[in-house]
Amino acid sequence: MRGILLVAIGYAIISCADAAVKWALPQIGIAGAMLWRGVFGAVTVAVIARAGGTPFAALWPVNLRLVSTRSLLHCVVSCAFYAAWFLGMPLADSYAVAAVSPLIMTLLAIPLLGETVGWRRWTSTLIGFSGVLVMLQPGGSLWRWETGVLLGAMVLLALTRLWTRVLARTDTPATITFWLMVAHIPAGLVLMPAFPPPETLFPSGGIMLALAALGCGNAMAHMLFARAFAMAPVSVLAPFEYSPLIWGLPLGLLIWGDWPSNTTFAGAAIVIAAGLYNLYRERLRARLARQAAAL
């Protein structure tokens, strides 16, 4: 229950941070958003860790290779989202596409975590992916190349979520999050020639506050995620990947007046229903396994 509470709070925070960066992107650009997210995020983690009595040296990762790989892959995910928002994709639409992540996690857990997936979960997962086809109807609001980029990024996102569970065995939430934030700094610098800021890299006033909210919010949310995945199984926390839809819809409507199309709602409903069924089957399988072990 504590893991569920932490991950739910984390998604609420990160949804607000996403709204902040989407608002700032027209001025700061994709590379600038990556860079400032890394700066503000890394500083936030270091301050929180220091306040908790953790010396800076303790942030050095135990599993350096996996922490580094995970951090770099997550930069690709961030860049994909920022590109989609920069080009005008509404928050709720991007979150609807991201709803496939738990289904991908179900499949990736087979080779990575050694989990067994029965025919019922295979069937529900395939049905869930059919919901993506509903969202991607030709001529619909999600019939755009940015959707394909996001779907590819969801494979990487699912992979990083599973690796969070693996890293929880060796590294602290502060360590995992700190290096994730740090990785965004060189990523932003590398992307700068291709995606320079439309206006300025050093904005003032509200834009800088939005970027600070982006970095600080992401840092706090990812620390909560890392702690939650150390407390609870992936199968229990995966359905909360859908909770940004709850936040993204009112945020998008309030700030930009965005309202998803009916096909987006219908497709997202199919994807979410399949994910929740997978959760039910996983819980049932675990309960039967415990009962068999007790006999």
Image: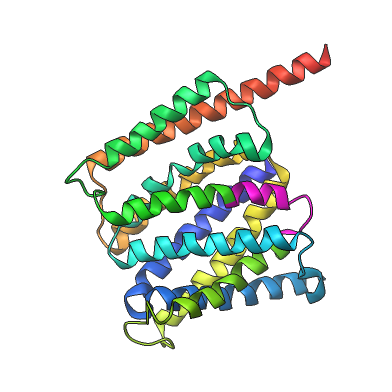
At which x and y percent is residue 14? 51, 59
Residue 162 is inside the magenta segment? yes
Residue 215 is inside the magenta segment? no
At which x and y percent is residue 113? 67, 38
- Give the image quarter of residue 117: top right
Colouring method of the image: rainbow
Q: Is residue 129 visible?
A: yes
Q: Is residue 233 visible?
A: no
- Answer with left or right where residue 85 lies relative to residue 236: left
Q: Residue at x 70, y 71 (%)?
A: 48
Q: Quadrant of the N terminus?
A: top right
**Numbered range of the magenta stretch:** 160-173
State the residue lying farthest toward the top. 295
Q: How many marks?
A: 0
Q: Residue at x 57, y 21 (%)?
A: 118
Q: Residue at x 67, y 45 (%)?
A: 3
- Answer with left or right where residue 109 lies relative to residue 169: left
**Residue nearer the viewer, 40 or 168:** 168
- Give the image quarter of residue 134: top left
Q: Main secondary structure of the magenta part?
A: helix
Q: In the rendered image of this protein, does residue 33 appear above or below residue 85?
A: below
- Answer with left or right where residue 234 lies relative to residue 139: right
At which x and y percent is residue 228? 67, 48
At which x and y percent is residue 273? 43, 30
